[in-house]
Image: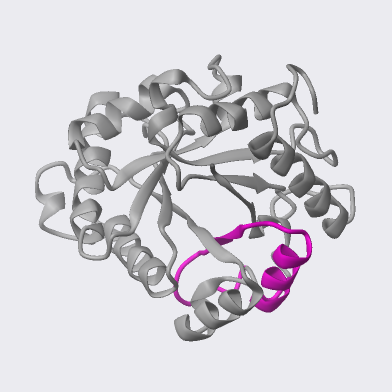
Amino acid sequence: MPHIAFSTVACPDWTLQQVADAAARFEYDGVELRTFGTGSTSFACDPCLTSSAKIRRMFRDAGIVVSSLATSICFDAPIRPRIIGRVFGDQEQAVSEARRAIDLAAQIECPFVRVCGFEVPAGEKRRSTVRLIVERLAAIADHAHRTGVRIAFENGGSFPTARDVVEIIDPLHDPLIGLSWCVRTGVLAGEKPLPDAIADRTLILRVRDWRDGQLTGDDACQQAARALCDSGPTDSCVVFEWCRAWVQCEGDVDAVLKGAANRLFNWTHCELSPGAA
């Protein structure tokens, strides 16, 4: 049975203590912490701003797990100049950042780190970009094996469909690499809410408010959550993402998170009739 969590993109101005307290108050199982890496002050609740020991203690005391660590790390940067670029310059900054994120996740006892593709750059061939992304994922997977933290590769950008993400993770044959599946991104690309081909490899199911200012209540999100319950990994999670950090959203944060928790709990713990919300 997947556990339910909310992303801190809903509350960028909250402290980590406020996040932990809210998760317990609204009866979530966990939270997804958004991070921008060392030195960033974009979010008051960025885990890089607090000691790992304090984070572990804070969430343990609240009875809440850190479900995942969501980064904005992408592996699409081309190597330029094409030949000597691998020798000169910092061409693998994303790999270094991802390794640090994996280390942080291990320190705060977080099982998953979310990373992305993301776009095929102008002037580049898709095949070349895919090869680079696979190489970089392989490099961080090697680091992940030292910690047991798993990598959740998210659909998006030039890689929105199940076929797109499978093209990237399949060549690696690595049990520590799974998927973070954004329902909205997939459905807008013409996919089922959670395609059968990837359900058993979906570590994180991401459900968003379908329309600004409203709770996630679309049939697609419910169907995806039920599919994850039926076929997903037993330790997967469903993350509610209310993008208040990026766009102006109507509604009270507490009310939105509480309402989403109720829906997600019903979707993942009850047998609902088709179309119920």
Residue 229 belongs to magenta span: no
Residue 69: x %, y % from top left: 48, 59
Task: Decide if residue 152 is on the left or right side of residue 13.
Answer: left
Residue 153: x %, y % from top left: 39, 42
Q: Please give the name of the residue rendered at 61% of the width and 67% of the height, measured from the top-left corner.
A: 64
Residue 78: x %, y % from top left: 27, 42
In depth, the one of 125 and 212 nearer the eye is 212
Q: Let me know if residue 223 appears in the view.
A: yes
Q: Please give the name of the residue rendered at 50% of the width and 64% of the height, measured from the top-left corner.
A: 36
**Quadrant containing the C terminus in the rendered view:** top right
* Whether residue 232 is situated above or below residue 22 in the rendered picture: above
Q: Let me know if residue 125 appears in the view.
A: no
Quadrant of res 197: top left
**Quadrant containing the N terminus in the rendered view:** top right
Residue 41 belongs to magenta span: yes
Q: Please give the name of the residue rendered at 19% of the width and 52% of the height, measured from the top-left corner.
A: 139
Q: Please give the name of the residue rendered at 66% of the width and 29% of the height, measured from the top-left corner.
A: 221
Residue 134: x %, y % from top left: 23, 39
Please state the total of marks drawn on the protein image.
0
Write down the region rendered in magenta.
14-42
In depth, the one of 215 and 266 nearer the eye is 266
